[in-house]
Image: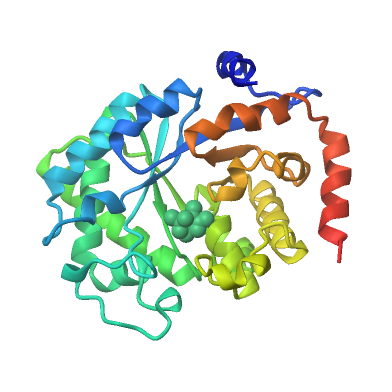
Amino acid sequence: EQSDLGELITVPSVTKDGAQVKLEANIGRPEEVEIALKFGAEGVGLFRTEFLFMDRNTLPSEEEQFEAYKKALEGMRGQVVTIRTLDIGGDKDLPYLGLQRENNPFLGWRAIRYCLDRRDVLKTQLRAILRASAYGKAAVMFPMISSVEEVVKAKEVLEEAKAELREEGQPFDEHVKVGIMVEIPSAAVAADLLAPEVDFFSIGTNDLTQYTLAVDRDNEKVREYYNPLHPAVLRLIKRVIDVGNAFGKEVAMCGELAGDDKATEILLGLGLQVFSMTPSSIPRVKKVVLSTNNEEAQAIAKKAAALA
Ligand code: PEP
Ligand code: MG
């Protein structure tokens, strides 16, 4: 089977009835773009940037971040690299950031919430991303968005960063795309309010499942309750895809579900066209894409969303 899958790497991902599907990679370090390309990724749908902030005692400088983002962008040779801004808090604690112990860290001061209070941290990161955008096709993605206000504020910081760079005469891509993770149920339910503010959505099924079903994603005791294919989660996924399509905005998925080949047919049936996953999962998912008929998949997805 392994060699079978190897042969799929250069084959375009198209369904039996001719629908184009984009298979992208999730990476956590710039070096991983090599692995992404090796497995046939057509872009990076999620570049987690936490590594830059971990195992150290001070914030990474703009220069340090710029070098890392530039490396990933150059490595992908013109294919998109979707760089997610800092997503700390929750399970990802960093002592030097001054995060306090919280009773409910997953519901607390994390990710974009932290960044909007520490605009300096966010702006430094956005400046680094923008500067790197001169070396490839970058996209910016904000995590843990729960309402429109956060997107508006985050975009304000982005505009400030752009204005500074223009002033300094530093080159960057003026048309860098801006998107959000849809990983909090409120963002999925109110996706129609968020759509006008963004260029794309990326569904984060890890957190979306956790928050929709009120199940800690890392707690073994409640593992059986953690089901990304729960009909309620599927309905939220469907809503985000439908709203994205209605507004002409790209909808991707970068949670683990996107790389689960047992879910591929259902996701295609829900209308998903961009899947981002651990690079090594790409061939297996592609295999399902190649053998899927969209009309049949739609019937399966409909059935799945209606199952009690
Ligand atoms: C998600 O929540 O689905 C996601 C992709 O982000 P992370 O796993 O980094 O929280
Ligand atoms: Mg998440």
Q: Is residue 186 visible?
A: no
Q: Position of residue 81 (x, y in %)?
A: 39, 36
Instruction: Specify how the rendered protein is coloured.
Output: rainbow
Whole-percent x and y of residue 140? Answer: 38, 47
Which quarter of the rendered picture does the C terminus lie within?
Answer: bottom right
Question: In this picture, is 39 found above or below 205?
Answer: above
- Number of marks in the image? 0
What residue appears at the point 55 percent right and 67 percent down from the top-left corner? 220
Quadrant in the picture for residue 295: top right
Q: Where's the N terminus, which quadrant?
A: top right
Relative side of 20 to 24, left or right: right
Residue 69 is left or right of residue 79, and the answer is: left
Residue 304 visible: yes
Report the residue at 32% width, 39% height from top: 174
Nearer-the-camera pick, 21 or 172? 21
Q: Nearer the viewer, residue 199 or 237?
A: 237
Looking at the image, the residue that sits furthest to the bottom is 103
Residue 150 rendering spot, x and y as whole percentages = 42, 69
Asked whether 132 or 298 is in front, the reply is 298
Q: Residue furthest front?
A: 221
Residue drawn at x 14%, y 59% is 59
Which quadrant holds residue 172?
top left
State the image coordinates of residue 260 (x, y, percent, origin top left). 63, 43
Is 295 located above or below residue 108 in the figure? above
Q: Quadrant of residue 298?
A: top right
Q: Is residue 289 left or right of 295 when viewed as pictured? A: left
At horizontal 58% and vertical 63% (from top left) the residue drawn is 208
